[in-house]
Amino acid sequence: MPAGSKGQAARFLRTTGQHASIEPDAFTEGSYVLSIGGSEQSHVNLAHPEEIFYEYLRRIGHLVDLAAPPGAPIRALHLGAGALTLARYIQATRPGSEQHAVELERELLDFVLRQLPLPEGTDLHTITGDAREALGDLDPGVTFDVVILDIFSGPEAPAHIANPGFYREVRERLGPQGVLIVNVGDEPGLTLVRSQVAAMRQAMADVAAFGEAGMFKGRYPGNIILIGTQVPWTEKWSAELEARGPHPAKVVAGVDLDPLAG
């Protein structure tokens, strides 16, 4: 493919034994969809990388917007790369940012970067391997303004990552105002969300949850974004995120989060 061409490109992923494919979005010119194992995984708008199609990724983008003054470069770590939608967003909205992306599937990173080139000027360091191992291998002097974990797709999760010890290791990599953003895809009942709220609360100064308002009732599958901060959560952030949407949006923090704490 690359950008602008028609048809579908595919690649076999040896680690999982699945096939990844990238094909044009029939409804949005300049956009492409990454599917893995036949399921849509990421959406990229090459023409306008600041526009995010998937709702949960848009919510993460709004959190990144709040992590530093508008337009200021940040240092970001992506644990789980996908089609690098958020790395593209950060470059578009915060030029000059330094980014690192960790992906277990070597073939996926190569495939995505070849078929969907990054915006000019993107400073992205790619790492192939396990997220926890890669975290430990990073230069010990490097800290991040934002760490984005997008690996979980419930109700199962890698045990060596879905625990307080891992979140403590992430916390050590965050700057004083750094933010940990964790996307949790879960089933009705929110078993994985509950376990991760409890685990993050053992590691971070404060934890909040952000998602579509109906998700918190635990009646259907979907995504909830968990946010770990180095400082107490503020109502100002809650109001800002709920105003930005996608709507209906809800932020749960403090004692209101207790029912989701395991």
Image (cartoon, rainbow, N blue to C red):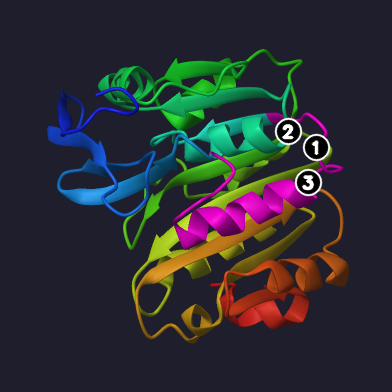
Distance (Cα) linking label 1 and label 3: 11 Å
Distance (Cα) linking label 3 and label 2: 11 Å
Q: Quadrant of residue 151?
A: top left
Dot 1 alpha-carbon crowd within 10 angstroms: few under 14, some 14 to 19, many 20 or more: some
Residue 186 in picture, x, y percent from top left: 38, 66
Q: Which residue is mark 3?
A: 67
Disc 3 is placed on an element classified as loop
Disc 2 is placed on an element classified as loop
Q: Which residue is mark 1?
A: 71
Q: Tell me the amino acid under the disc marked 2.
A: Arg
Residue 219 in picture, x, y percent from top left: 38, 86
Q: Which residue is mark 2?
A: 94
Q: Residue at x 73, y 19 (%)?
A: 142
Residue 46 in picture, x, y percent from top left: 45, 34
* Figure quadrant of the N terminus: top left
Relative vertical location of residue 259 with respect to residue 186 in this rendering, above or below: below
Q: Tell me the amino acid under the disc marked 1.
A: Gly
